[in-house]
Amino acid sequence: MDKTSKPEWKVPWKGMVVALLVSAGALAVIFWQISSPREVLQELREYPLRHFFGALFFVLAAWIVDGQRIGTLARALGQSIPWWELTIVLGAANFLTLVTPFAGGGGALIVYYLYRRGLKASRATAVVLGGGLAGQSALALLGLSTSSLLPSVPPDLAAYFTTVKIGALVYLSIIAALQVGIVKSERLFQWVFRKFGRQSRSAAWLADFRSTYEFLLTKRTGHYLTCVAIAFSYYVVYYTGTFLLLGGFGIFYPLLRFALAVLFGVAPVFSPIPGGAGLSEGISWAVLDGVLQPDELASFILLWRAVVFYIPILLGGTIFVVLVMRWASGGNIKGRRGSY
């Protein structure tokens, strides 16, 4: 039933345009409010390039780590996928994440990829949802740990990290409740079966999805915990990019710089605007105003946006378009036809 139709993938031009316009508008407002373009360009010329390229390296290297998050759960279902394939797909999924609201567009692409690899759509969805919730749990744990381990925090920043700690605990509780609800929701699924009939496609899909998700959490607990650990490593690698960018300005001690990197990175996940455009810039402006000089602050925001947003969109978007063209012609990632 899962293979009766294949969805058509299209480049999300509207999301890209909205994300780019809002982000560019936010940058323009910030530049004109806090520093002149001439001062920003002068600061950028003096900024150490090793920090910029080091940050870009870690942001892109994080795609490799993130691929193993999905690969671990896929292996639990008998699907062994080469790491490089997962890296390519996660690069394209990262692009969709950046140009869709609440950073939620990449999951559908991964489901489709796993479907092409031979997993039923219901099982592929269970893998992606499990990996996604594992990732969100890891993000909350990272935010909680970095905020809690800070030996000292400037008074004007203390409220931000208190909010992160409280938010992380609440978020972990919500994720745990959601996962328990999926595994233990037999009555709900039985109601769905009665309403639609046990022979319906919806009932069969839900039954297979639930049983697969329960299998991953209860029978393959080791794989799931490994998935959480890999997701934690992914965010450490990813936020090292922002950490290095801040290091180029020599502010604060290392752990506080990394905690700030985590704080800046959380905003896009909960933003209804693609890529967290505007919200991310606003948070960094509010937090670093008074810490950096106006031209330094504007330069950081521009460098940060280039590393975590513009360059990944260009690279990930290119990968996405190539994948769509390959799949539309009936080929796989390597270009050979029918090997899936």
Image (cartoon, grey):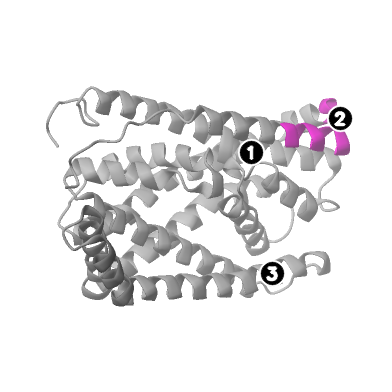
Instruction: Report helix, strand or loop for mark 3.
Output: helix
| Magenta-colored stretch includes residue 16 | no
Q: Give the mark nearer the N terminus: 3 vs 1.
A: 3
Instruction: Report helix, strand or loop for mark 2.
Output: loop
Compute the Cα span from label 2 to label 3. 33 Å
Work out which quarter of the rendered image holds the C terminus and state it.
Answer: top left
Residue 145 or residue 321, whichever sits in front? 321
Compute the Cα span from label 3 to label 1. 24 Å
Please give the name of the residue rendered at 20% of the width and 59% of the height, measured from the top-left corner: 204
Amino acid type of the residue tagged 1 in the rendering: Arg
The answer to whether residue 307 of the structure is visible from this angle is yes
Instruction: From the image, tell me which residue sits under label 1.
Output: 305
- Quarter where residue 35 is shown: top right
The answer to whether residue 250 of the structure is visible from this angle is no
* Residue stretch rendered in magenta on the structure: 25-39
Residue 58 appears at what percent x and percent y? 49, 45
Residue 103 appears at what percent x and percent y? 51, 47
Left or right? Give the position of 28 relative to 196: right
Residue extending furthest left? 338
Please give the name of the residue rendered at 29% of the width and 69% of the height, measured from the top-left corner: 189
Amino acid type of the residue tagged 2 in the rendering: Ser
Which label was assigned to residue 36?
Answer: 2
Amino acid type of the residue tagged 3 in the rendering: Thr
Compute the Cα span from label 2 to label 1. 18 Å
Q: Give the mark nearer the N terminus: 2 vs 3.
A: 2
